[in-house]
Amino acid sequence: MIYLASPFSHPDPAVRRRRFKAAARATARLLLAGVDAFSPVVHSAPVAACGLDDMDHTFWMRVDRPYLEWCHMVMVLTLDGWRESRGVHVEIAQARGMNKPICFIAPGDLGVRDVPAGPHLRVVRT
């Protein structure tokens, strides 16, 4: 079982939606390839939207830790923002503490498109 770590939190809801969709597509690609995968973003974001939106990082790490313990390795999906992601850093540190292998995979390697979280162009019609 692979634990697929990826960034999620961001002040812009559009970035969170983009990160969720990319993590979901990556998880689907792994599953289609016969790789059992657990993505905390994919499995938790829909639940969070049902009344847990205000839960903090500590809450979600407590929820996700048993899955991290169960998985045999951590794969970091290097979406834009992964280096700054507090959650990804904690997951990597916990995995290292459990002596689990960690690998990094680019979204494109799984056929997933990543769009940078920077400013987006908008067409304004006057």
Image: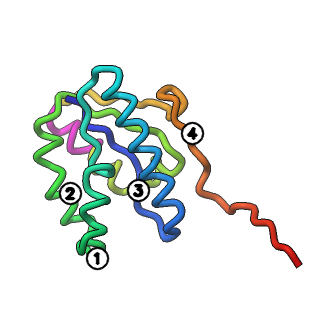
Circle 1/circle 3 CB separation < 8 Å: no
Residue labelled with disc 1: 54
Q: Quadrant of residue 9?
A: bottom left
Image height of 101 relative to 55, above or below: above
What residue is disc 3 on? 8
- Residue named by callout 2: 61
Residue at 19% over, 29% down = 1
Of the image marks 1 and 2, the number of the one nearer the N terminus: 1
- The magenta region covers 92-99
Query: What's the residue type where badge 1 is placed?
Result: Asp
Q: Quadrant of residue 101?
A: top left
Point out which mark residue 75 bears: none
Q: CA distance from mark 3 to mark 2?
A: 13 Å
Q: CA distance from mark 1 to mark 2?
A: 14 Å
Task: Compute the Cα span from label 1 to label 3.
Answer: 14 Å
Type of amino acid under label 3? Phe
Secondary structure type for disc 1: loop
Residue type at mark 2: give it: Met
